[in-house]
Amino acid sequence: MIDQSIKFDLALINRYDKAGPRYTSYPTALELHEGFGDEDYRQQIAKSNAAGGPLSLYFHIPFCDTVCFYCACNKIVTKNRKHAEPYLESLYKEISLLGALFDNQRVVNQLHWGGGTPTFLSFEQMQQLMTVTREHFLLKDDDDCEYSIEIDPRETNSHTIKQLRELGFNRISLGLQDFDPAVQKAVNRIQSEEQTFRVLADAKTEGFKSTNIDLIYGLPFQSVDTFADTLDKIVAAEPDRFSIFNYAHMPTRFKTQRQINEADMPSAEVKLEILQMVGQKLTAAGYVYIGMDHFAKPNDALAIAQREGKLYRNFQGYSTHSDCDLIGFGVTSIGRVGDAYIQNVKELDEYEQLIKSNKLPVYKGVTLDFDDQLRRAVITYIICHFELNFSSIEDAFSINFAEYFAKELRELAPMEVDGLITISATGIQVLSAGRLLIRNVCMVFDKYLLQKNQQQFSKVI
């Protein structure tokens, strides 16, 4: 069994706390370009079909009833539920277009609805979306799959969770962020404990295989004590997973964040104290540190996959299905098909117009060359498993690791001196003090990073 412990070393964290990618992909989404279009995507689909294997489907539902000021997602804020109808019609058409291109015998092992707020849709709309998906893709009828949906507890009623289970979903993720009234008011997300715990209880009653809670630290008026209070209440409800994100305040990129008063935000020192408290409380409660911002119970699929060396990372975060090509549907969605990443257009009007013209709504993409695929394998393994066996990379890519990455190994040397990692003739091992700083280790292997403005990324801690 691997060591999944973490060590909080304040001096090291302060020394290494700089901005960098979250590596939900490599190359990162910043490398996608508009020179990649419809025909390029079709070529990658053909390559994907030739390789075969299972599929993962992601559907972006961009609608929200109210705006949360911290949000950095692509969303359409409206209280008019009818606004979803033309979007869904375009989504059905996109499903049909892509369904005709992919081999219909490839089983869908993973499916995810994100947003926005997928539960903005009525049950009838959700039912129709799932029906259309089943018409064009081979969805599973048993529970031997991972079909998940993001839930806003404020957008559910006593029947919602039961209905989602009937549609085939077996995993849910609940947005919460913080229970403290002052914090909720400051970020425009008023959500009661009753709403949140009702959804968790209903999910257990209906037999959902996994429940995840999203929290954010670094929001206005948060302190160690107030965030600990929120965390204690949620731990008592025993969700299977936690995603606890560091709030990245980038108001120049995300207009809604301009509603947040920076003077009310906790200092960097307080944020670090919150992070330390989170690690202590969750590990004491029996959760294991998966990596980045994720904790899970030892018997959760994420923790099991990590112990078995099968954990993966994609645009939704950590995943147990590394063997799936990922198809994105809807505005701004990103997929990974064949040797490429593909992103759909961002504007609703453009999306609908392209769909009406029977064109794939591709905005941009990137085809990975040999070096990209090699570095992706290295970064993925390090960020998922906190170790890297050189021989596994050498066998897969027919290289000599020490020669190919001589420069990177030299750059890693100070991290070994600082006790973040150990480097041997056979591989790299990330130590307990280095796990919170795993992004720093991965950044050494990122050939594109020196070309980027660090303000494009969030801080690693």
Image: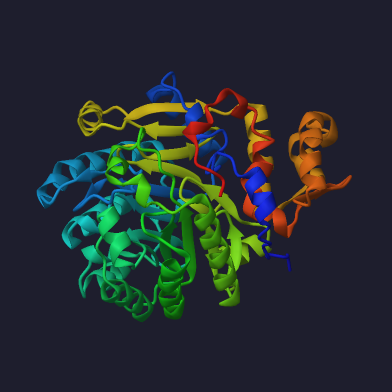
The image quarter in which residue 335 lies: top left
The residue drawn where x is 50% and y is 41% is 458
Side of 299 relative to 382 (left or right): left
The image quarter in which residue 157 lies: bottom left
- Residue closest to the far right: 425
For the rendered model, the colour scheme is rainbow
Residue 395 in sight in this render: no
Position of 251 relative to 179 (above/below): above
Q: Position of residue 32 (x, y in %)?
A: 47, 27
Quadrant holding the N terminus: bottom right
- Residue closest to the far top: 35
- Residue closest to the far front: 263
Q: Position of residue 300 (x, y in %)?
A: 54, 70
Side of 361 relative to 246 (left or right): left
The image shows a total of numbered marks equal to 0
414 vs 3, nearest the viewer: 414
Q: Position of residue 212 (x, y in %)?
A: 43, 65
Q: Position of residue 172 (x, y in %)?
A: 38, 64
Position of 403 relative to 301 (above/below): above
Side of 93 relative to 179 (left or right): left
Residue 206 in sight in this render: yes
The residue drawn where x is 49% and y is 67% is 241
Side of 449 relative to 178 (left or right): right
The residue drawn where x is 25% and y is 55% is 188
The residue drawn where x is 42% and y is 42% is 327
